[in-house]
Amino acid sequence: MRIAVLGTGIVGRMLAGKLDELGNEVVVGTRDPDKTMASTDTDYAGNPPYSTWAGEHPGVTLAPFADAAAGAELVVNATNGSASLEVLSRAGEQNLSGKVVADVSNPLDFSKGLPPTLFVKDDDSLAEQIQRAFPEAKVVKTLNTMTAAVMVAPDAPGTQGTVFVSGDDNGAKSEITELLHSMGHDDVVDLGDLTTARGAEMVLPLWLRVMGSLGNPIFNFKVVR
Amino acid sequence: MRIAVLGTGIVGRMLAGKLDELGNEVVVGTRDPDKTMASTDTDYAGNPPYSTWAGEHPGVTLAPFADAAAGAELVVNATNGSASLEVLSRAGEQNLSGKVVADVSNPLDFSKGLPPTLFVKDDDSLAEQIQRAFPEAKVVKTLNTMTAAVMVAPDAPGTQGTVFVSGDDNGAKSEITELLHSMGHDDVVDLGDLTTARGAEMVLPLWLRVMGSLGNPIFNFKVVR
């Protein structure tokens, strides 16, 4: 499948790498490919610049957001939550229309210090904001309840948890569920329509505190039943 | 241990019954014991009136909130979140002073329809509101992330999950952790100070949607790591 992964951070890279490894045709979307490739900065967590990662993943191409989305059958929003609406606008409404948009972002607000709060919650969600902004897209919220390393290695010992999907389009959820299975996610729980993304997003404050308590992000939530 | 369980609903009853079974001296607190015992109403879920339950649990006594709290070493807030501050005021600040108050309630707001939203979240929590209202109490948030039947039978197949504790007093958290162990909770995660209760309370919207998806509340969240 032709997949555009929007975002060059660690989440975008890990998802792009895994989806490429699984045989998909993956293009990563960024604002300015030349600038992204020229950057020599490590990120806040010490991850190497994008060009280093790109060199290790020759099968993954890099393109402006709009070009990446235009050629894709499936678009993954792997940007920071605070940038998601702007990035998807740059990707272009016409390039999202009729397509499944997997939203793995979180509405984290770092402006008031740590831990972050949520800039939308409870009676709305970032996923719903995206759906309203792009009504012809088929938004599916998923994967936002775990760290990137667990998103792409959910069958590793100690992280065999649950992944949630929320969305208004059942066909889109089936497609994403199939993709999740291909990535090794055995336990997919369909929460219901896109309003249920409120629940999936509101688990972030607990996730952050569990990470603080355990001292590392390599864990997952499992619905035991 | 002498334990006061405030609240005669299903959560209060289940906790009182379990703590009684474990050999504790349990008194249930209510507004007006005569009225509680005289009621013949079933609740919204079809649970029998309190008097029926009391007849099956002769070891558990019933007392006004203040009397129940006065004689207790440990107080459990098992009331509806919207009533918690008022009920604890009726229990009396002096009767809570210096004591561990286990808060198992959730700040659910049903006024805007179903599913409920949270009347406090993200930059504050019900547990912190209680702590501020009763600064001499040692508030520990716990058990609010699962249904009552799972609180008291956490070792039943299919519900072997994680229970969280949040609180500013480490001694109080140790005491609650010991009590949780006695109830069969094997996996207790100390999230940190009482601000971490925000995370535990904000998991409720996800909990409600999982319940909707599974069709029943007999499940638990497990932190797999």
Image (cartoon, coloured by chain):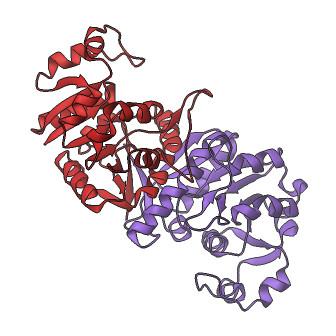
Chain colours: A red, B purple
Q: Compared to B107, does B46 lie above or below? A: below
Res B122 quadrant in image? top right
Q: Residue furthest front?
A: A94
Residue shown at 73% from the left, 54% from the top: B101
Query: Residue B30: image x %, image y %?
Result: 80, 74
Residue shown at 73% from the left, 62% from the top: B82
Which sits in the foreground, B196 or A13? A13
Query: Residue A51: image x %, image y %?
Result: 23, 14
Query: Residue B112: image x %, image y %?
Result: 64, 64
Query: Residue B107: image x %, image y %?
Result: 66, 57
Res B62 quadrant in image? bottom right
Q: Compared to B122, does B185 lie above or below? A: below
Q: How many dots with numbers?
A: 0
Q: Is residue B149 left or right of residue B57?
A: left
Residue shown at 58% from the left, 58% from the top: B143
Which sits in the foreground, B201 or B149? B201
